[in-house]
Amino acid sequence: MRYVMALISTIAALSACAPTPPGESAAVQPASPGLVTLSGTVFYRERIALPPDARVTVRISDVSLMDVAAPVIAETELATGGRQVPIAFSLDYDPARIEARGRYAVSARITDGGGRLIWITDTHVDLPSPGQGVDLLLVRVSG
């Protein structure tokens, strides 16, 4: 078990050092006193244009407990206004709500103007440490 934890810590540390393509991530900036700002981008790989009225929602959730709805720590929603991916975001959250033993995820979704889900994160993305940004890869929702 210790070996697995050491390996996970090493991989996380190395991935934080990986170069980020230009324009795909922003650094975390201090927000108002007591708050931390998580910045980053949402993107997908397909060459499909977003509708001009699309909306992006980014959320930090407490996923520490299984089989219960994950409480939302912070959320932001923004209109794309015709912009295309990658779309930058920033999300303020209270670091006092982050417990050292907890598990937290960052997720994103894109809906059309009618609220229909069209893109979503489909994998767990850990909340990065303050001072690091995050890039969220979305997948297309069929239907």
Image (cartoon, rainbow, N blue to C red):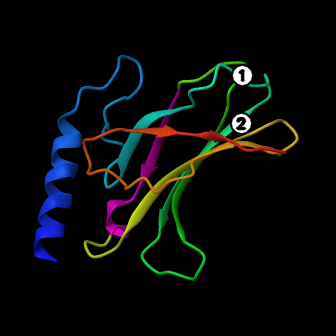
5 or 87, which lies in front? 5
User: Crowdedness of circle 1 by 10 Å Cα count: few (<14), some, many (20+)?
Assistant: few
Say left or right for 6 vs 86: left
Rendered image quadrant of residue 134: top left
Q: Which residue position holds label 1?
A: 81
Q: Secondary structure at mark 2?
A: strand
Vertical relation: 72 (above or below) 102:
above
Q: Which residue position holds label 2?
A: 55
The residue positioned 71% from the left and 36% from the top of the image is 55
Q: Position of residue 121 (x, y in %)?
A: 57, 48
Vertical relation: 76 (above or below) 86:
below
Q: Position of residue 46 (x, y in %)?
A: 62, 25
Q: Position of residue 52 (x, y in %)?
A: 78, 22
User: Crowdedness of circle 2 by 10 Å Cα count: few (<14), some, many (20+)?
Assistant: many
Task: Say which mark, if any, is on residue 7.
Answer: none
Q: Which residues are magenta?
A: 87-98
Name the image quarter holding the C terminus: top right
The residue positioned 12% from the left and 64% from the top of the image is 6
Rendered image quadrant of residue 15: top left
Vertical relation: 71 (above or below) 41:
below
How far apart marks 1 and 2 lie (CA) works out to 8 Å
Number of marks in picture: 2
The residue positioned 13% from the left and 53% from the top of the image is 10
Name the image quarter holding the N terminus: bottom left
Say left or right for 53 vs 95: right
Q: Secondary structure at mark 1?
A: loop
Say left or right for 103 vs 54: left
